[in-house]
Image: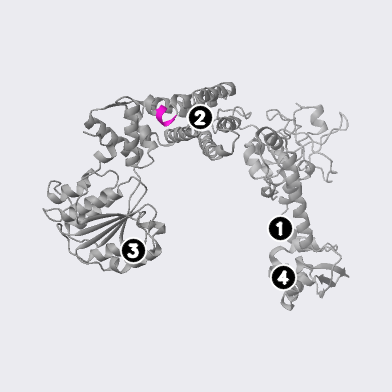
């Protein structure tokens, strides 16, 4: 007797034998029980998920001699002939071979005749999307109102190519891909019945390689049985599929966890010597990283019967969760870029080296994570400085602010001379205001300096001058001689040149500005900035106008021709009103349209932004870290994505 392949031998003959299509089975079974039968069905899904199988089972259910039922007997003449493919009232048409209108016209002409043996005449049209446009048009009328004894079952892997006029006439069922676990479980059942020895990890490999198709899994199982001489072993299946043994993947990730570049390269070379397919190696590595992420976030998601369960949890404790996510993305991108690499070996090796380059230890940081209560180190004022040692007289918060502003956190000369000098006792302030000093005297860290540096970096505007009176620290000026009495200085006079410009600007209070006596010194852009939102829509006119002349009461503005529509009477009246209210006097506003040879505030802002952008891009191009990435890893700086930090 000739051998029958497993895919044909184990084709389901009942709805109960189907795997992974419970939603379709339930709908069809209920329709058969309630005799609510549609005249046309459309089954969609990828190859090997059961479209033709469900169509044949439905044909048996309709023509079984026991009656229309969801559980055909399988022994009557109609059931046996349908299983054997000899039932005269079941017509299976391959639309890929019969695409023309003549083939469909012949089918439709025969549809009007009553069934010969069965209860219904069933037409199964496979790959229906291959029909021509004229063929679809020819069957529309019959498909919408067929004879009572005719049922159409259409199957396709590409429903997007089926005209909507056909879709609207059919009851559509979308068949799902089967999960690797469902495939492996069904294969185990088949092998148990066949009496063939197998290993569960081998079936798991076949389930993943099938990519949701049971027919593909059964074909691969046939191949694995032949490869293993009647047995299905994990080593044999890995060799047959070109899959990577997970032990090698664990060795790679173990070398990554230790930041051991030499061992990592050695493991990559070992994989190459074994003739492993690097595309499948990256796919298996991504799958293992997915399991590691599950073990770190949802440990219960790792099956208790997983062969490498202990190794997965042990490795999950050694790798940080963010590193696992990064390695997963690198594996995916490395697999995508494998075709662009000089060869697969180089592409795989570069993917592993990229993971190593982003490892926290190899990147110069500590892999250990301190407790939240531990005080984090303050970043150094420049890349070459140590973050652990700060100059005397410089608080961590002031150092963080100075770093954000791009200036070194320098200490005062007095602090350099007396790094450990105790703070002098405060004395009552003298009646006369002390003369300003160019630089703040050394002082011990104030209570606000004891906050973590990250807080100071997030809120740089919290300068000492804005601290409550109880939190201020009295400072002593630089001593002229040993006999001079220490003077008590207000911290508001602290040296501002240690702070970045934006920190000093943020100390200004708009309410204080409004309370000052209005003074206009001819700086039109500054005046607009002081007025702020009071201008409303008239701000567009003010921003795009240049001040030609001002004599104390008359403002003569010039507007470019391109902004003529902003120089309307309403905008002029609004601007005049706000200016008069701010200056506390009646003013006159004259606006002319002309070609400008001077810069408007809007032009100045645009120029300033261009300069900032150019400076930011130049800074990024000259950054040593960026240059190192470009030289050593072939990175590319996308200049158009560089934006200056808005201060």
- In this rendering, the answer to whether 530 lies above or below 267 is below
Residue 239 part of the magenta-drawn span = yes
Question: Which range of residues does the magenta coloring cover?
Answer: 238-243
User: Residue 558 at x, y = what percent?
Assistant: 83, 71
Foreground residue among 397 and 568:
568
Foreground residue among 427 and 494:
494
Mark 2 vs 4, N-terminal side: 2
Query: For the point 17% across and 49% down, which residue is it?
Result: 81
How many C-alpha atoms fall within 10 Å of the one at disc 4: few (<14), some, or many (≥20)? many
**CA gap, disc 1 and disc 3:** 84 Å
What SS does tag 2 mark?
loop
Question: Which residue in the structure is indicated by mark 2?
Answer: 319
What SS does tag 4 mark?
helix
**CA gap, disc 2 and disc 1:** 50 Å
User: Residue 164 at x, y = what percent?
Assistant: 38, 64
Mark 2 vs 3, N-terminal side: 3
Instruction: For the residues labelled 2 and 3, say whether their Cβ atoms are less than 8 Å apart.
Output: no
**CA gap, disc 2 and disc 3:** 65 Å
């Amino acid at each position: 007797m000739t051998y029958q392949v497993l895919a044909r031998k184990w084709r389901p003959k009942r709805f109960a034998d189907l795997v992974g299509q419970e939603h379709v089975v339930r709908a069809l079974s209920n329709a058969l029980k309630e005799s609510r039968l549609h005249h046309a069905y459309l089954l969609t899904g990828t190859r090997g998920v059961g479209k033709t199988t469900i169509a044949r089972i439905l044909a048996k259910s309709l023509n079984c001699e026991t009656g229309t039922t969801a559980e055909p007997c399988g022994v009557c003449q109609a059931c046996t002939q349908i299983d054997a493919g000899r039932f005269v009232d079941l017509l299976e048409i391959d639309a890929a071979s019969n695409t023309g209108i003549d083939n469909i016209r012949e089918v439709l002409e025969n549809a009007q005749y009553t069934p010969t043996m069965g209860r219904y005449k069933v037409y199964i049209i496979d790959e229906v999307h291959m029909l021509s446009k004229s063929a679809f048009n020819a069957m529309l009328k019959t498909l919408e109102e067929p004879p009572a004894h005719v049922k159409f079952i259409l199957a396709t892997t590409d429903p997007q190519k089926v005209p909507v006029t056909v879709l609207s006439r059919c009851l559509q069922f979308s068949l799902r891909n089967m999960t690797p676990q469902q495939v492996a479980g069904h294969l185990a059942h088949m092998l148990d019945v066949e009496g063939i020895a197998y290993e569960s990890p081998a079936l798991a490999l076949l389930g993943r390689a099938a990519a949701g198709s049971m027919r593909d899994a059964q074909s691969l199982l046939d191949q694995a049985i032949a490869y293993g001489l009647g047995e299905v072993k994990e080593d044999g299946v890995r060799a047959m599929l070109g899959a990577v043994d997970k032990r090698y993947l664990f060795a790679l990730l173990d070398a990554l966890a230790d930041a051991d570049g030499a061992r990592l390269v050695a493991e990559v070379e070992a994989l190459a010597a074994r003739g492993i397919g690097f595309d499948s190696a990256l796919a298996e590595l991504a799958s293992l990283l997915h399991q590691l992420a599950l073990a770190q976030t949802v440990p219960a998601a790792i099956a208790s019967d997983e062969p490498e369960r202990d190794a997965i949890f042990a490795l999950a404790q050694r790798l940080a969760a963010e590193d696992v996510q990064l390695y997963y993305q690198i594996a995916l991108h490395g697999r995508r870029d494998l075709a662009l690499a000089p060869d697969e070996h180089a592409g795989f090796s570069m993917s592993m080296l990229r993971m190593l380059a982003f490892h926290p230890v190899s990147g110069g940081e500590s892999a250990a994570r301190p407790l939240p209560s531990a005080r984090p180190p303050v970043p150094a004022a420049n890349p070459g400085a140590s973050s652990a040692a700060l100059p005397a007289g410089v608080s961590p918060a002031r150092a963080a602010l100075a770093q954000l502003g791009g200036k070194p956190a320098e200490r005062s000369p007095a602090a350099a001379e007396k790094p450990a000098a105790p703070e002098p006792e405060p004395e009552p302030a003298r009646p006369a205001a002390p003369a300003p000093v160019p630089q703040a005297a050394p002082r011990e860290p104030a209570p606000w300096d004891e906050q973590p540096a990250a807080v100071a970096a997030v809120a740089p505007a919290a300068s000492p001058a804005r601290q409550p009176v109880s939190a201020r620290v009295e400072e002593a000026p630089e001593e002229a001689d040993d006999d001079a009495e220490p003077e008590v200085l207000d911290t508001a006079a602290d040296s501002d040149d240690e702070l970045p410009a934006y920190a000093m600007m943020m100390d200004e209070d708009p309410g204080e500005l409004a309370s000052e006596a209005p003074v206009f010194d001819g700086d039109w852009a500054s005046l607009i900035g002081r007025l702020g939102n009071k201008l409303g829509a008239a701000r567009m006119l003010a921003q795009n106008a240049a001040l030609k002349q001002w004599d104390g009461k008359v403002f003569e503005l010039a507007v470019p021709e391109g902004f003529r529509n902003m120089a309307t009477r309403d905008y002029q009246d609004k601007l005049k009103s706000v200016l008069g209210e701010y200056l506390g006097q009646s003013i006159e506003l004259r606006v002319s349209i002309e070609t400008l040879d001077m810069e408007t505030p809007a032009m100045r802002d645009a120029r300033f932004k261009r300069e900032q952008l150019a400076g930011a891009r130049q800074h990024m191009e000259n950054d040593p870290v960026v240059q190192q990435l470009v030289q050593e890893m072939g990175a590319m700086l996308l200049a158009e994505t560089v934006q200056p930090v808005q201060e």
